[in-house]
Image: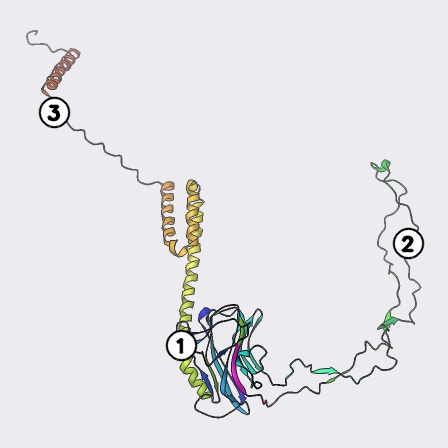
Amino acid sequence: MTGGRAVLLLVVSALFAQIYASDPLFHESFDEGFQGSWIVSGKEEYSGVWKHEKSDGHEDYGLLVSEPARKYAIVKELDSPVTLKDGTVVLQFEVRLQNGLECGGAYLKYIRPQEAGWDAKEFDNDTPYTIMFGPDKCGSTNKVHFILKPDDWDEDAPTEILDEEATKPEGWLDDEPEEVDDPEAAKPEDWDDEEDGEWEAPKIDNPKCEEAPGCGEWKRPMKQNPAYKGKWHAPMIDNPAYKGIWKPQEIPNPEYFELDKPDFDPIAAIGIEIWTMQDGILFDNILIADDEKVATAILEKTWKPKFDVEKEKQKAEEAAAADSEDLSEFQKKIFSVLYKIADIPFLEPYKIKIIDVIEKGEKQPNITISILASAAVILVTVLFRTLFGGKKPVAPVKPIAEVKKPSATEADAAGSSGDKEEKEDDTTAPRRRSRRET
């Protein structure tokens, strides 16, 4: 299951007691609350507050861990102890990790009968139990406990112990090495030892030799000696007297045994004693039964309907997550295109504003993706028009001036002007001969 909707049902059957019956030996549904029947530990370290709350998304009540980073302890004494003998006992309960489980326990302790005068408010981590059962997770630890603990069980006892009756044999050589020089080995006749030679005082550089290829007596350079074998040492052989470091011989532990047919103390109470970093842990339907059919019937009635609902929610969440992942890939492509558009030299004066819009869109992709996609289309359109041209804009048509009706004076003046123009035209044009002249 995923996230805060995880529903975990823990069921176990162990060969203990068998009294076939139609009703469970114990069943706590928390339908009526827990105050009065369950006792919260009075120890100061257990400051966590238990609450009677509904399971998230369901109408079913349970016992809720309400605060993170707290220790919790609560116990319920049974009306009569449950004996664990030779048959079947079913221990079953629901635990829902509504906020997950990163570091903490969610297990139950089935408490053995305590000494006379024991008060349930004294319940803590040291209270002896017969069985501990349930999940526990923190760091690399992630497991479901099922611990069977007899009253006299020493889980730290080794399978073998030292034989205290053993004594060190006389003549044992503790200080002898494991290998010694071979007394029969001899130095080969052709072996050449390297000599150190005479000591010479340190020299300083001769200034006359600075520009010369060299000074002093010329000597041949040294090379690796193919006959060199190093210092000779006699080979080592096994020490025939070596016996190693003495320690007592280990013998089978007379107290070690395997339990084929357990006979544990009865269960007199059920306790929850945990330390968790998460809240939202909900316990429900704690059951002890001696008939598997009874346990299965209660499971089908109480747990199965909730499980089916959560399963459908999980499928819906997974489908939504898959759609979101596809959308995220599409968004990345859109933003990549927008960044490339912002790098176009033609848009350099607007680049800062474009980048600012893109960055805002990345912070809220679900809100702005459609706007940014539209912006991309507009920018591409502007770019194409700039590069490849478009229709030239139509020149605006000037408005026609109103025709003003001239006054009589203006008309006469215009007429005089017209006569003058005609006269000027006559002077420039060739004269026609009149009939009289002809």
* Mark 1 vs mark 2, CA separation in Å: 94 Å
Q: Earlier in the sequence, mark 2 or mark 3?
A: 2
Looking at the image, residue 416 sits to the left or right of residue 6; the answer is: left
In the structure shown, which secondary structural element does the residue marked by tag 2 occupy? Answer: loop
Question: Which label sits on residue 60?
Answer: 1
In the structure shown, which secondary structural element does the residue marked by tag 3 occupy? Answer: loop
Q: How many numbered markers are drawn?
A: 3
Amino acid at circle 2: Asp
Q: Kindly tell me whether residue 429 is visible in this rendering.
A: no
Q: Position of residue 258 (x, y in %)?
A: 64, 87
Q: Quadrant of residue 350?
A: top left
Between 414 and 128, the one lying in front of the other is 128
Magenta: main secondary structure equals: loop
* Mark 3 vs mark 1, CA separation in Å: 98 Å
Q: Residue furthest left?
A: 436
For label 3, count other residues whose C-alpha is less than 10 Å away and answer few (under 14), some (14-19) or many (20+). Answer: few
Contact, mark 2 vs mark 3 (Cβ under 8 Å) = no
Q: Which residue does the numbered mark 3 point to in the structure image? A: 405
